Amino acid sequence: MRRHEFQPGRLIAGLALLVAGVLYLLDSGGEADLPWFLVIPLTLGGLSLAALTGMVTYAVRRDRRDQRDPISESRDQ
């Protein structure tokens, strides 16, 4: 398997959905008594945090790529 770049936004999204799924599973098994409207804000908050993290990661990587490759800029002009 080829190595791929680390994407923290996808990690956060997966963890948020995993937590929501585990909470739902615990509630359906009778282990926890959660209100039904708790899962929706938890999921949306996690996905929003993941989107923000993904945008920041993209901006940082784009900035690093632009700073690292000044030769291609001189060839383009």
Image: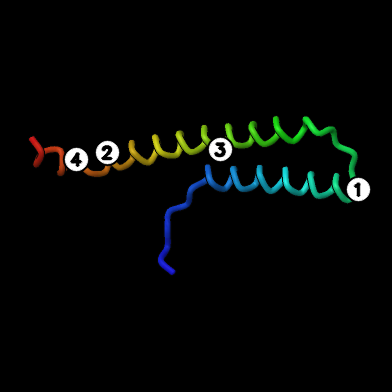
Mark in front: 1 vs 3: 1
Q: Amino acid at mark 3?
A: Ala
Indicate which disc residue 15 carries: none
Indicate which disc residue 66 carries: 2
Indicate which disc residue 50 carries: 3
Residue at 27 percent of width and 43 percent of height: 68
User: CA separation, marks 4 and 1?
Assistant: 58 Å
Local packing at callout 1 (Cα closer than 10 Å; few below 14, some 14-19, many 20+) is few
Rendering coords of residue 29 (x, y %): 88, 51
Residue at 42 percent of width and 63 percent of height: 3
Q: Quadrant of residue 46?
A: top right
Q: Is residue 45 above or below residue 17?
A: above
Q: Amino acid at mark 4?
A: Pro
Earlier-in-chain disc, 4 versus 1: 1
Give the residue pinned by disc 1: 31
Rendering coords of residue 64 (x, y %): 33, 40
Rendering coords of residue 70 (x, y %): 19, 40
Image marks 3 and 4: residues in contact by CB distance under 8 Å? no
User: CA separation, marks 2 and 3?
Assistant: 24 Å
Earlier-in-chain disc, 3 versus 4: 3
The tally of labels here is 4
Left or right, residue 2 beside residue 39:
left
Image marks 2 and 3: residues in contact by CB distance under 8 Å? no
Mark in front: 3 vs 4: 3
Earlier-in-chain disc, 2 versus 1: 1
Q: Nearer the viewer, residue 62 or 39?
A: 39
Mark in front: 2 vs 3: 3
* SS at mark 4 in the image: helix
User: CA separation, marks 1 and 3?
Assistant: 28 Å
Earlier-in-chain disc, 1 versus 3: 1
